Image (tube, rainbow, N blue to C red):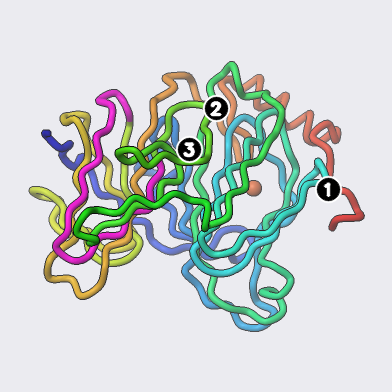
Amino acid sequence: MKSRSIAAVIAAPEFQEGAGFIVHRPFPTARLDHLDPFLLLDEMGPVVYGKGQAIGAPDHPHRGFETVTYLLDGEMQHRDSAGHAGGLHPGDVQWMTAGAGVVHSEMPSDRMQREGGKMHGFQLWVNLPRAEKLVKPGYQEIAGDRIPVWRSADGRVSAKVIGGQVESTRAVIETHTPILFLHVTLQPGAAFTQPIEASFNAFSYVFAGTLAGDGEAGIVRPHAAVLFEHDGEGVTLRAAPESDEPLHVLLLAGKPLGEPVARYGPFVMNTREELVQAFEDFQSGRMGSIPAEVT
Ligand code: FE2
């Protein structure tokens, strides 16, 4: 199988978002607005908060896409305008379909706000096709021990299958359009090859260890996204043999929607008029608000 070559490596330097939330963000940036159907990737942290320092994202709306949260370290709590509340622990995934609109808060747990601790994880935004932008909001909340794990015969590579499938290991999360979302762990010198449809956009994101890129890409260290060309039947990830720690990398691929993207802040629609409508619906309270009894 011919593997896709690397099109670009995009560094994701650390910066402070909003009230001081620390993220690495490969896109959207000046260099890359989005990679259809993926709209945003944030690596949250890694950061170690002291007592009373942990911060998150208080009440805010979303419409027209999905937010996927995958936590590695720390604890988060989530509340929304439909009265839904839940917690996320290391390894857990929350796949939220904002659809027609939700107002939610994403905060460190009360315990973490009180005691501090390490926070590390990801938030990915996945676009919805025009016909499904206004679907009823929904959640898939999957505890870490329910995420299927594929392992190589020699035990040197493992892949948590959050979306899509690796050989016969299939994700429990269902997606609106075909999405592959893996957390792959490779021992130094190991390689992993995943077939991917030629039309799909694909990228990986290195967050620990060292990836051995092809040709001019050289080695890739955290925190960086690797974009792949469409010139092969799949993607091969290689962990640099000289590294003294395992490579941890996300591998994401998806069928491009091929539709216009009109985005502003927490709303992603197809036209400017639909964005204006989203603002009006939010401001007039038609996306609801978080009930007082659960805040
Ligand atoms: Fe959010």
Q: 36 and 86: which one is in front?
A: 86
In the image, is the residue at mark 1 within 8 Å of ligand 1 by its beta carbon?
Answer: no
Q: Which amino acid, by three-letter code, is at mark 1?
A: Ile
Of labels 3 and 1, earlier in sequence is 3
Q: Are marks 3 and 1 in contact (CB under 8 Å)?
A: no
Residue 50 horizontal/vertical position (percent): 61, 82
Quarter occupied by the C terminus = bottom right
Q: Which amino acid, by three-letter code, is at mark 3?
A: Leu
Q: State how far apart marks 2 and 3 are (Cα).
A: 10 Å
Residue beneath the point at 30% across and 38% down = 167
Task: Specify the label residue 39 is tagged with.
Answer: 3
Residue 251 horizontal/vertical position (percent): 34, 46
Quarter occupied by the N terminus = top left
Q: State how far apart marks 1 and 2 are (Cα).
A: 24 Å
Is residue 154 left or right of 248 when viewed as pictured? Answer: left
Q: Which residue has dot 2 on it?
A: 128
Residues rendered magenta in the picture: 181-200
